[in-house]
Image: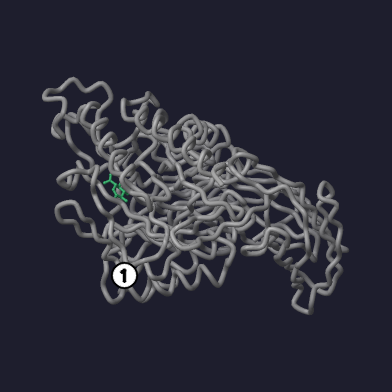
Amino acid sequence: MINLPGRTTTSLNGLWEVIIDPFDAGKGSWIALYQDRKPESDSDFVEYGFDGGPRLHVPGDFNSQMPELAYYEGTLWYKRQFEYTPSDKRLFVHFGAINYRASIYLNGEFLGEHEGGFTPFQIELTDRVIKGENSLIVRANNERIRDGIPGLGFDWFNYGGITRDVDLVETPATYIKDYKIQLKRGDLGTIAGWVQLDGANLRQTIRLSIPEAGIDKTFRTDSKGRAEINLPAELALWSPENPKLYDVQIASATDSTREKIGFRTIEVEGKEILLNGQPIFLRGINIHEEIPQRKGRAFSEADAQMLLGWAKELNSNFVRLSHYPHNEHMVRLADELGLLVWSEVPVYQHIDFASPVIQRKMDLMIREMISRDKNRSSVIIWSAANETYPSPERNAAIARLSQLVRSLDSTRLVAQASNTFEYHDDRTEITDAAFEHFDLVAINQYFGWYRPWPEQPGVMKWVSDFDKPLIISEFGGEALLGSTAEPKHAAHSWSEEYHEDIHIQQVKMFDSMPELRGVVPWILVDFRSPTRMHPVHQQGWNRKGLLSDRGLKKKAWYIMRDYYDRVQKDWEAREHTP
Ligand code: GCB
């Protein structure tokens, strides 16, 4: 995958013409919308065309742009024309994401398809693009399917369409297709990675420069166009306190590119998480990729600024980008702001692990997620799954996924979030054996909401067979901002007071867990979920946000903010204690 920063790109963002096709009729050979036919004579009857129809913004989900598409799950055809003058360059179209299935056509010809709503893909146009006007057509379909990822049921809004940026990217005939430049696992003094060329001229000298760190070295690519990188380096390390990014430049005889990269290590040792060799505590927050005030998918840099700005205001040092890879703007901004990131594929709850095609789809999504963000210092955890339920098929699939992640990237931690545990009295036992395949034990628990509180949260003992760091990756409950229903301190009032109580009790429990290495409240902002149908309190929203759907702070926000201030001070004091 070509990395866009450091490249010559032409944005295809803007207004695209669309046709709404609820019966998915346009792909049939008789209608063939993708041909974008124009009448060739006065007697030539062409029934279908984009001219004069509605236009929608790209990037952007379609549901939030036209009232009649508010709950639409089906096919939309998109068309965008662009002028081009072919040269000796190669041309690619890059889609940041299309939810969920996409077919791409250029000038009436089918070029390729992609499945998966949250990862980018590229298609080469070099031999298909013509001089003058070109017509790019996309069929986007967001119908839920049983063997999709996620599957039929998920607790967030199924925004459809071309939800992320679209760019044309030009490269030389032989170009730097991809690279990984990171610190070697557990080694603060060695950069390790690789560079991959693509094209006819595969044996070349690659030059890697990081001027600010005095690095300027050359490497040879082999007959497959690949160079392994390994060199000693003295670098200022990237961390939440000092999110240092270096200008990294890579050049071959035929191409060059550059981007900003930070350098850090992340490991676990027993029950500790070590960032740059130092124990850390993750002061987290879960985030969905949604702007509630707009009732739409987040898609811009400004959106990322707002969401991650709130995370910083909460005094978080860690964000769990749930439950799918978020827009690239988010991880790039996290690099700049010094926020650690958990990135996840939507292998969610009741995925059909028995389906023969699901394995292939999961693997592809993991590859695409890692491929895009492998150079982001902020990303410390790849998550393979959320709340999947033990069964022979699931256990085997999960084990395989964790192996796949490790084989693709040895420099980060591998995790799953699980809600498989048991509790009696004041003792909670972690019973999901699949944690043996992961670096962390990450538990989602909703004491005080879906499950009653144990006798005394403040003396709760967490028992685990795993000598691994424990984090609470979800907890919380729902409240409608400003709810005045009585009795305030009861769950069924949906009051801010009860929501606040849940967080107070959770913090009490966290304080009694010396082995705890991070907490991640569910969730930053109230988010849309059509299955949340309580007619008064929910109205299509999951109300577990620390912020309301208008971005206003609920009482529970302050409980977490105070807790994070306190934990930060405690950990800083601990660092300075010999
Ligand atoms: C969970 C899920 C999350 C839901 C949340 C809830 O355990 O991981 O996707 O939205 O609970 O609100 O029930």
Where does the N terminus fall, quadrant-wise?
A: bottom right
Question: What's the amino acid at mark 1?
Answer: Ala
Closest to the observer: 329 or 338? 338
Image position, residue 541 (x, y; %)? 28, 36
Q: Is disc 1 placed on a helix, strand or loop?
A: helix
Image position of 365 (left or right of 278): left
- Measuring 13% from the left and 33% from the top, which residue is drawn there? 492
Closest to the observer, 323 or 409? 409
Can the viewer see residue 21?
yes
Residue 36 seen in the current view = no
Q: Nearer the viewer, residue 207 or 367?
A: 207
Which quadrant would residue 539 be assigned to in this image? Answer: top left
473 lies above or below 1: above
- Which colouring convention does the figure follow? one colour
Q: Which residue is mark 1?
A: 433
Image height check: is 28 above or below 134? Answer: below
Q: Examine the rendered structure and indicate whether residue 411 appears above or below residue 160.
A: below
Residue 526's quadrant in the figure?
A: top left
Q: Quadrant of residue 338?
A: top right
**Which residue is located at x 37 percent, y 49 percent?**
514
Decide if residue 332 is on the left or right side of residue 90: left
Number of numbered discs on residues: 1
Task: Compare residues 228 and 490 and report the one nearer the observer.
Answer: 490
Q: Position of residue 361 (x, y in %)?
A: 44, 68
Left or right of 506 on screen, residue 372:
right
